[in-house]
Amino acid sequence: MKFALLCLFALVAVSAAEPGRKLKLMASVTIDLDSEEHSPKTKWAAFKQLFNKVYKTLEDEAKAMEAFVVNDAFIVAHNKEGHSYTVGHNEFSDMTNAEFKEKMTGYKTKDSYLRNRQTNVDETLHAKFDSAPSSIDWTAKGAVTPIKNQGQCGSCWAFSTTGSTEGAYFIASGKLLSLSEQDLVDCDHVDHGCSGGLMDNGFDFIVKNGGIPLESCYPYTAADGTCQTKCANAVTISGHTDVKKKDEKALVAAIAGQPVSVAIEADKPAFQFYKSGVFDNAQCGTTLDHGVLAVGYGTDAGKDYYKVKNSWGATWGDQGYIMIVRNKNMCGISQMPSFPTGAKAASGPSPGPSPGPSPGPSPGPSPGPSPTPGQTHYGDPYDGACETGEVNVTVTGVAGAFCSPECTLGIFCPKDVPAGVTAKPQCALQDQKTQSKYCALICSPSTDESSLRAGDAQCGAKASCKAISGVGLCTYDS
C-alpha cells in the first residue's frame, strides 16, 4: 500500500441535496514509505505527518528516528526477498522491537499472561472438518465489529474475548453489538487488566457476572480502572469450548461455526510490520503472548490461511487484519483456541442497536460503511440512493456524478466497487467546510485522450473516465 502526501488544487461541488457545500479534489504526490525510492530522512518526515507523531523532546525524536531508520532497512530488505507476504511502515515504526514487545504484546509482567491450558475440549470438531466449507469470512457475513485499538495496554485478551462473544451473539440473534473490553479489564479480577489475561477466564467471568455490557455504556480507556456497575449487561453466554491443541482441522471446523479466540506469538519484527499477503515466517515462534480473533479462512495464491482480526487499530496490517498460513501451527495459532457457547441477550433492558467502534484512544476504524447486501460503494446516484456514509458528488465543469464514501484516517477507502470496475479507490476529495475526506475512483494518472479512453474500461459499463485537474475520475452520466 502506498501512503500519499496530498496537496489541494481544484474545487468540486456536492449535488444540490447539500447546497453550498464544497469539496476539494486532492492530487497525490506519492511517498512510498516501503520502497528505496526515497531517503529515510524523507520517509521520516512523511511518517510523522501521516501518523501525527509529536515528540516531547528532541532527544525523544532522535531516538524514535533511529528506530525508524533500522525498521526501514528491515522493511526494504524483506520486500526484496520475495516472500508470500509484505511488510511496511505503520504507527509502530518509531519503536524498537524491544519497545514494541513491551508495549504491545503483554511483556509487562515476568509471567507469560496467556497460560496454555485447556479445560472443555470438543473432541468432535476434527470429524466435522470434511463437511466444513472451503472458505468462510465472518466479516463479510456481518458478525465482526470494526477494528478496535487496545492502545499501549496489554488487554488483547479482553478484545479477543469480546470479539468471539460479539460473533456468537450475532449468529444467535442477527444483531451485531460492540461489547465492553473495559468491563473485563476493570472487573475480571482473575485476569490482570492491562498486564494480561486469558480468554477462557474472560468467558468464565461473563458467565459468572450474568453477562457483559455494551461498549457505548462502558467505554474503553486503555488503562486499568475501578470496576463500574452502573451499566446493564447486554449479552451473556452459558460457557465456552476449547479446540483440541494443534489440531488445525478441528480449528477450521470451529471457525466454520463462528469467530474463534486464538493466542499467537506476535513479537517478531515481521509481525510488527505485516502489511499484506499470507504470513508464513519460520521465525515466528510458539511462545504465546497475544490474544486475537480468527474470523475466517480460505486460500490465497495457493496458500491456505486463517483470517485474523487484531486489536492494534486499522493502520496496522491489512486494515487491521492479517492472513496467517494454515497447517503449520504458525505463531502457535492452533495451541489454545476457544469460543463461547450459548450466547443470548442478558436479562434486563434490551441492548438495542450496535453502537459502532470504541470511543477509546485512537480507535481503528473499519475500512468504510458496510454496503447494502447486493450493492457496493461508488455506485450510480442516478440509479438509486447512495449507500449510508456516502455523498452524491458532482464536479464543476465535469459531466456526471458519483457516490463518494468518506475516507477513514484520511487514508483508507472501501474496496468494494461495482461489477466490472477496475479503477482504484483513492482518498481524493476534501470537504472545504468540515475538512472531511472522501473517496473517488481514479481511472487515469493523466488527462491525455488515450489514457482517458483506456480509463473508460476501468470505470465499468455504466461510467466513464472524465478529466479533472490532471487526473481521470470515474463518473456516471445522467
Image (spheres, rainbow, N blue to C red):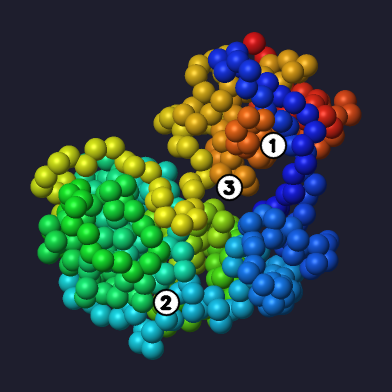
Q: What element does badge 1 sit on? A: strand
The three-letter code of the residue at mark 3 reads: Leu
What residue did someone put label 1 on?
Answer: 428
Q: Is residue 304 left or right of residue 410?
A: left
Q: Nearer the viewer, residue 422 or 133?
A: 422
Image coordinates of residue 127 in percent, x first then y, are: 25, 64
Tell me which label, 2 or 1, sits earlier in the chain.
2
Image coordinates of residue 288 in percent, x first then y, are: 40, 79
* Residue 420 visible, this orientation: no
Q: Nearer the viewer, residue 351 or 114?
A: 351
Question: Residue at left 67%, top 40%?
Answer: 426
Question: Residue at left 58%, top 47%?
Answer: 409
The three-letter code of the residue at mark 1 reads: Ala
What residue did someone put label 2 on?
Answer: 106
Q: What element does badge 3 sit on? A: loop
Tell me which label, 3 or 2, sits earlier in the chain.
2
Question: Residue at left 42%, top 55%?
Answer: 360
What residue did someone put label 3 on?
Answer: 409
Q: Please identify the residue farthest to the front as the structure is shown.
A: 57
The quadrant in which residue 67 appears is: bottom right
Tell me which label, 1 or 3, sits earlier in the chain.
3
Label 2 to label 1, Cα distance in Å?
38 Å
Q: Marks 2 and 1: CB-CB under 8 Å?
A: no
